[in-house]
Amino acid sequence: MTEKQQMYESFASTLILKQLQPVQIAFERTGDPNPANPQFQTSWTMKFRNDDPVINKDKDDENRKIIEFRPLYEITVKSGDTVIYHHQTIFILSYSIPDTDIFKTIWTDNETKPVFTNQNIGKVLWPFIRQQVADGLCRMMLPGVLLPLMI
């Protein structure tokens, strides 16, 4: 195990999830499925605001800090070349952490930052995204599209 992997694993074991809340959900039907081509293609992205994460004091524990992320998920469903569904959700995701210096090292490192965003934030939020997309497709009277269990 490399030094970076050890640092990341040690840091990840100290995280405490404090808040997970969608703050904005928007979806729309933008077309009709192509009956001649019942195959659907899905794509998704997760983006962070430029000032993410925000670091504050943890009101529950003076020895810890809160790191807050506001990721935006965008999901698109296509039927053939036509986009038939577009979905956006913004979450607030907050963690309590004991050491901001280690977090800043992880967050600014090009190797460990993607590990944190994909292995932690992505996996925590993905089940909620899957459910929101399934609900949105149903409400728009579109066929269900199963997103992968995990990303």
Image (tube, rainbow, N blue to C red):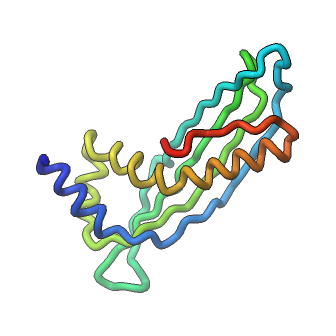
Residue at 68% from the left image edge and 55% from the top image edge:
24
**In the image, residue 116 lies at what x, y percent?**
35, 51
Residue 67 falls left or right of residue 99: right
- Above or below, 132 against 38 in this view is below
Residue at 57% x, 47% y is 72
Which residue corresponds to the image point at 42% horizontal and 57% vertical from the top-left? 53
149 left or right, relative to 134: left
Q: Position of residue 112 (x, y in %)?
A: 27, 46
| Foreground of the two, 115 or 47 | 115
Q: Nearer the viewer, residue 34 or 25?
A: 34
Instruction: Say above or below: 126 vs 56.
Output: above
Q: How many marks?
A: 0
107 vs 25, left or right, is left
**Residue 11 falls in image quadrant:** bottom left
Residue at the spot 76% in from the left edge and 43% down from the top edge: 27
Residue 87, placed above or below residue 18? above
Q: Position of residue 133 (x, y in %)?
A: 70, 45
Does 143 sit above or below residue 38? below
Q: Position of residue 37 (x, y in %)?
A: 77, 16
